[in-house]
Image (cartoon, rainbow, N blue to C red):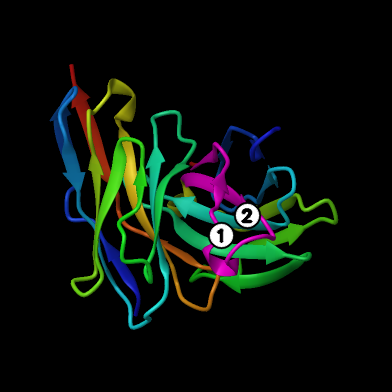
Amino acid sequence: DAGVTQSPTHLIKTRGQQVTLRCSPKSGHDTVSWYQQALGQGPQFIFQYYEEEERQRGNFPDRFSGHQFPNYSSELNVNALLLGDSALYLCASSSPWGPGPYNEQFFGPGTRLTVL
Amino acid sequence: AQTVTQSQPEMSVQEAETVTLSCTYDTSESDYYLFWYKQPPSRQMILVIRQEAYKQQNATENRFSVNFQKAAKSFSLKISDSQLGDAAMYFCAFPTSGTYKYIFGTGTRLKVLA
């Protein structure tokens, strides 16, 4: 059973460009969350997708947007990249079964984004 | 506001010894869950242990156990018989009540010395 997968592994962009990161959830999971992890910090919640809708959003500007597809995979888009967007972007999926918001999240290996 | 604090940026432990990582949190809720996640150098974060706040008994998973003190809002992780493979960043995480947003602490880097 494949776990959470993310692509690409690494990405280098320049300021002002746009980037799309992709995530496939663990089999049987229908909920995808995205996190930004700056170097030496804990993950910061960006948003969560469920039933192809953004269900919850953290304190991130509108430059950060996402999408969830019918097969539950998800994309994270970041427009007008800033140097401060350089980070590890983690995707996490969770199951429809269990105590709702307290379901265990399964994380992918992340995408390392470098903005020059 | 709900917060999670890990006050130990780095800890070291000798192989086979025991180490305790600290975490404090703040919430006005009475029922919630707390998690410890491990992030090895390969980056993939995995769940170590979970505690349900309404349960009196501290959670245990093999060599990993927690000391959950609800009144003090403290949730420490004890690793017994430390192994080289335990070396990683450890994050305390708290799903905010009524939402799907997880709050993570800043992490503790654990070094295991041979």
| Rendered residue at 69%/46% (across/down) | A25
| Rendered residue at 58%/40% (across/down) | A108
Q: Chain of mark 2?
A: A
Q: Is residue A39 visible?
A: yes
Q: Chain of mark 1?
A: A
Q: Is residue B3 above or below residue B84?
A: below
Q: Is residue A82 visible?
A: no
Point out the image quarter for the N terminus of chain A: top right
The residue wearing badge 2 is A94
Pick out the residue farthest to the top.
B114
Give residue A103's mark.
1
Q: Is residue B4 above or below residue A18?
A: below
Task: Look at the image and give the residue range highlighted in magenta.
Answer: A87-114
Q: Are marks 1 and 2 in contact (CB under 8 Å)?
A: yes
Residue A111 in magenta stretch: yes
Q: Pinpoint residue B98: horizontal percent, then vertical percent.
A: 52, 78
Residue type beneath disc 1: Asn
Give residue B24's mark.
none
**Which image quarter: residue A66?**
bottom right
> Label 2's element?
strand
Mark 1 or mark 2: whose residue is earlier in sequence: 2
- Are discs 1 and 2 both within one chain? yes
Q: Pinpoint residue A116: horizontal percent, then vertical percent.
A: 48, 41
Q: Pinpoint residue B58: horizontal percent, then vertical percent.
A: 30, 56
Q: CA distance from mark 1 to mark 2?
A: 6 Å
| Rendered residue at 60%/57% (across/down) | A33
Q: Pinpoint residue B16: horizontal percent, then vertical percent.
A: 19, 24
Pick out the residue farthest to the front.
B57
Q: Is residue B94 above or below residue B89?
A: below
The 10 Å Cα crowd at callout 2, few under 14, some 14 to 19, many 20 or more, is many
